[in-house]
Amino acid sequence: MPVLHADRYFVEHVKYIRLNDSKIHDCFVEADNWRHEQLVEMNIHVGLMFAAKSVMQLMVNPFVGPLTNRIGYSIPMFSGFVIMFISTIIFAFGESYGVLFVARAIQGIGSACSSVSGLGMLATQYPDDKERGQAMSLALGGLAMGVLVGPPFGGLMYQFVSKEAAFLLLAGLALLDGVLQLLVLKPGVRREAQEGAPLKNLLRDPYILLAAGSITFGNMGIAMLEPSLPIWMKDTMRAQKWEQGVAFLPCSISYLIGTNLFGALAFRIGRWLSAGLGMVIMGVCLIIIPFANSLGHLVVPNFGLGFAIGMVDSSMMPLMGYLVDLRHVSVYGSVYAIADIAFCLGFAVGPALSGSIVKMMGFRWMMWSIAIIAFIYAPLHYFLRDPPARMEDRGLVMGGQKPAQYQTHNIDNKVPPPVPPPPVLSGGNALSAEVDQQFPVEWEKCEPGPVPATGSTQFPQYR
């Protein structure tokens, strides 16, 4: 009897433990679901903060472009440095979401001044198309260095030092850049020699719009990844802060390689082909990324993604200047305002919509939808293969002047046969030579008549 009582007690105890385990398991599931929902909501807020800079930059760019045509590039570039320095200080000491949001928006104003001025200055200093492409690839390489160092630097400093230290160090680097601008550029008003094409005329050019669309969609993939990938890694991989920052390291390294490699290579194979291939590679990488289960699985697709974006940017940025040279007038402030608008449009729409798209469709379908857009847009680059010149527009912009007349050259290096001198028909006297000079005739069709006697004032007869 006591044995039966003990068995019954043991069975009841086991049931009680199983019931508690089930309740504990349900609590863990509910906590995990709550954590996932909180991360999704965080994704929306982080995306909006990322988009604030691009939206503000998008609004300021149409004013910066025409301004550079009037006062030059050095003053807007230095103004951009001052604004960026102020925003970095606000980031260092800001604590609330609202203060950080304002700092991010102010940063967009400084970026608009710096980007448009810098690209326009390069296009002006390097009129040769090949040299311009190489110069802009170096400039984009500088951008890649910032993207390369930024995420791992921010993640490591935030986890092991402090947020304030990271931004104060960046403010010191910005101050050094301002001193270099004062010493090298010597900011001052420098007007353009000729008036540039109005912004609305450039926006009506289908070839400029096609190149701008390539910049937008080429950068939209990484723009959506920046706010959403760290949160997705935290949700699915339980990634630490430094891992979330290091995940972008392959993308940044390959972007640096791609921009420097295709600055010259795109000029040889065709910038339209380079950008089209970049779009295809980007689409393939975006399809692969959602299948990653660890940080190591993200290395190859992120490397390919950065390389593809480098192909697009290093091809389309010089092409924008070439299109202005070919179809309008060679003043570059407005066209690079359009290029920066296109760049910012991708980084404004991408982060702003990424949180909502992840909530509605999931991270995987968000990546796949951008890949589909890239595949559809890639063949359109064929229209940029040989854009036609529009000389009548250039004539109107230059105040009604006729387009320049170009001489044709003998490309075969063949020396033309010498033209024989006309025969002397008048016996060599001064009067007849003067008459021959004033009244030229077709010598092949004329036959000389009898030569008059020496000293005669009669003119030779022709028949």
Image (cartoon, grey):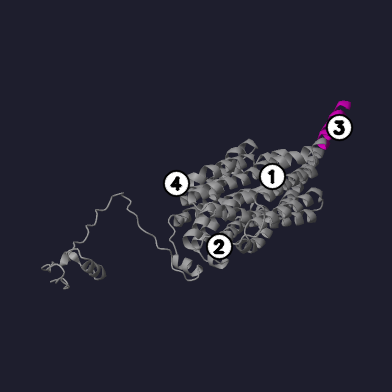
| Residue under the point 49% across and 59% down | 325
Q: Read off the magenta span.
A: 1-16
Q: Which residue lies furthest to the bottom in this view?
A: 458
User: Disc 4 marks which amino acid?
Assistant: Arg
Residue 9 — which label? 3
Secondary structure of residue under mark 2:
loop
Amino acid on which disc 1 is placed: Pro
Look at mark 2 in the image and give the residue it sits on: 193
Which residue in the rendered view is the most extreme toward the top?
3
Residue 7 sits inside the magenta stretch = yes
Does dot 3 land on a helix, a strand or a loop?
A: helix
Q: Badges 1 and 4: C-beta atoms under 8 Å apart?
A: no
Of labels 1 and 4, earlier in sequence is 1
Question: Where on the picture, by quarter, is residue 285?
Answer: top right
Q: What residue is disc 1 on?
A: 230
Along the polypeptide, which appears first: circle 2 or circle 3?
3
Tell me, yes or no, whether the highlighted magenta stretch contains residue 113.
no
Looking at the rendered structure, the number of numbered marks drawn on it comes to 4
Mark nearer the viewer, 2 or 3: 2
Q: Residue 90 carries which label?
A: none
